[in-house]
Amino acid sequence: MDVREIIARRAAQEFKNGEVVNLGFGIPTQAVNYLPEGVEIILHSENGIFGFGPKPSYDKADSDMANAGSEPITLPKGAAIMPLNISLGAMRKGYIDTTVLGALEVDQYGNVANWATKRNDLWWPGIGGAMELTYGTKKIVAALVHTDKNGNSKIVKQCTLPLTGKKCVKTIITDKAVFDVGDKVLVLREVFPGLTVENIKAITEADFVVSENLKEMNLK
């Protein structure tokens, strides 16, 4: 199981029956393929879709049916397609219960940066619809790899990249751990099987305390 699947599988467990859920670019879009049995949600994609379904097999993919990341989707009975302005309006007005966003950095205050890194002195690629989601969604889940390619923590004391949203993240899911965002400090709720609290401290810049109910991540 690669790191992307670990994160997507665990993110899917955050959804509650009946919720309207937005899945952001990258790792979050894979969560649709791991929904827990018996949990029925309405999936939203910011390009203008409510009620889409899991990724189809290669032979059944239709280039006219895709999520905001241009990945193929299915449209089960009851799905709705709408103009982008209506979709963004739904995001701003609070119709989305939970959003799972990919992230470049998340800090212990619940700030998230997910839209830009500096390349050739330019910030790239652009904000997209993530800012509307961080403003209008009831629960923001940040889903990201715990460290960058150099081993540096992406769970930081304070974000250094341009922010997408301030103090909006409620839960952080990585390939190593699950944190809840507390009062200026994170709460370690789950660890990847086989890892210890000391292992997580060694790869995490942000301050965190350990939940009394700490347990291993369930990835079945």
Image (cartoon, rainbow, N blue to C red):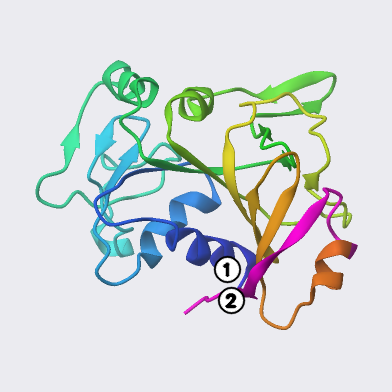
**What are the residue bounds of the magenta stretch?**
202-220
Residue reaching furthest left?
77
Q: Quadrant of residue 54?
A: bottom left
Name the outermost residue toward the front: 212
Judging from the image, what secondary structure is the residue with disc 1 in?
Answer: helix
- Residue 206 drawn in magenta: yes
Amino acid type of the residue that numbered disc 2 sits on in the rendered structure:
Met
Residue 182, percent from left and from top = 67, 45
Q: What type is the residue that disc 1 sits on?
A: Ile
Residue 104: image x %, image y %?
A: 71, 40
User: What numbered label is drawn on residue 63?
Assistant: none
In the image, what residue occupies the spot 35% across and 64% down? 35
Left or right: residue 5 versus residue 31 is right
Tell me: residue 63, above or below residue 41: above
Residue at 74% from the left image edge and 21% from the top image edge: 123
Question: Residue 215 in magenta?
Answer: yes
For the point 33% across and 42% down, the residue is 66
Residue 6's tag is: 1
Cα separation, mark 1 vs mark 2, equals: 7 Å
Q: Is residue 148 visible?
A: no
The residue tagged 2 is 1
Is disc 1 in contact with disc 2, using a CB cutoff of under 8 Å? yes
